[in-house]
Image (tube, rainbow, N blue to C red):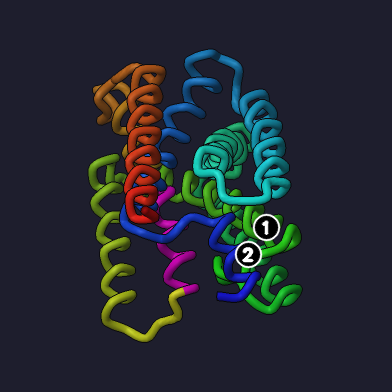
Amino acid sequence: MNPTTEHTLSKVPELTLIFWIVKIAATTLGETGGDAVSMSMDLGYLVGTAIFAIIFLIAVAAQIKAKGFHPFLYWTTIIATTTVGTTLADYADRSLGIGYAGGASLLFILLMASLAIWHRTLGSVSVASVSAPKAEMFYWVTIMFSQTLGTALGDWTADTAGLGYEGGAMIFGALLLLVVAAYFWTKISHTILFWAAFILTRPLGAVVGDYLDKPVAAGGLALSRYSASLVLLVFIVVCILAFEHKAAKKGH
């Protein structure tokens, strides 16, 4: 194993089943947590976005500065991207009045532009290539755009398309299963499939999060955003600790 590969593996988690489980939980937490700050605390989307943007920038700076992979730091950064994505998408869709279709289209263009500039600059958008600060910057900016796009897609599907939260969850869950099938039974680039899965987990988390905390009249369960966020956070921590324990035993 060459030094670059060692560095990459030490900064980015292994893409296992538990990674995707935690990713979906983190995106769901981003929805309930973002709504808790912007709606339940009545701070609004713009203030909520400003708060989470600061947390996101601090987390990314710490992540890039870190010499090795620190799971809690990594997942804190992921959660930061998904919470800022929630409030930013809601601000664009609702406060700016461009609607879900306009917000999703704009964010899709930004995401594709980020990937294109990343590929043109460094020659690859593979996670395995994230081995230097510049690549990490592209990685986190792209993730932030994907999380924001996912929020807009989730809201668009559940609300504008009229599928509801359960219908939206079924749609995005089915699309994720298609990506998994393509991974195992086709020769489609694994890099393309990774980003497809990464993007799709966000709207899945968005509709699940909305299903948990939206009013019963709107098709939700009307759970407390604070309670739902706390339960999701505890679940994420338990998964990370379990993964670390398994990795430690494997190392011995």
The residue furthest bottom is 187
Q: Residues within 10 Å of mark 2 (few under 14, many from 20)?
A: many
* Quarter assignment of residue 233: top left
Tell me the residue that label 1 is attached to. Answer: 136
The residue furthest top is 41
Residue 194 in magenta? yes
In the image, is residue 188 above or below residue 59? below
As helix, strand or loop, the secondary structure at mark 2 comes to: loop
**On the rendered image, what quadrant is the N terminus found in?**
bottom right
Residue 58 in magenta? no
Q: Are marks 1 and 2 in contact (CB under 8 Å)?
A: yes
As helix, strand or loop, the secondary structure at mark 1 comes to: helix
> How far across and how far down the image is residue 36, in percent?
48, 21
Which residues are drawn in magenta? 191-203
| Along the viewing direction, whichever of 49 and 232 lies nearer the viewer | 232
Q: Residues within 10 Å of mark 1 (few under 14, many from 20)?
A: many
Tell me the residue that label 2 is attached to. Answer: 130
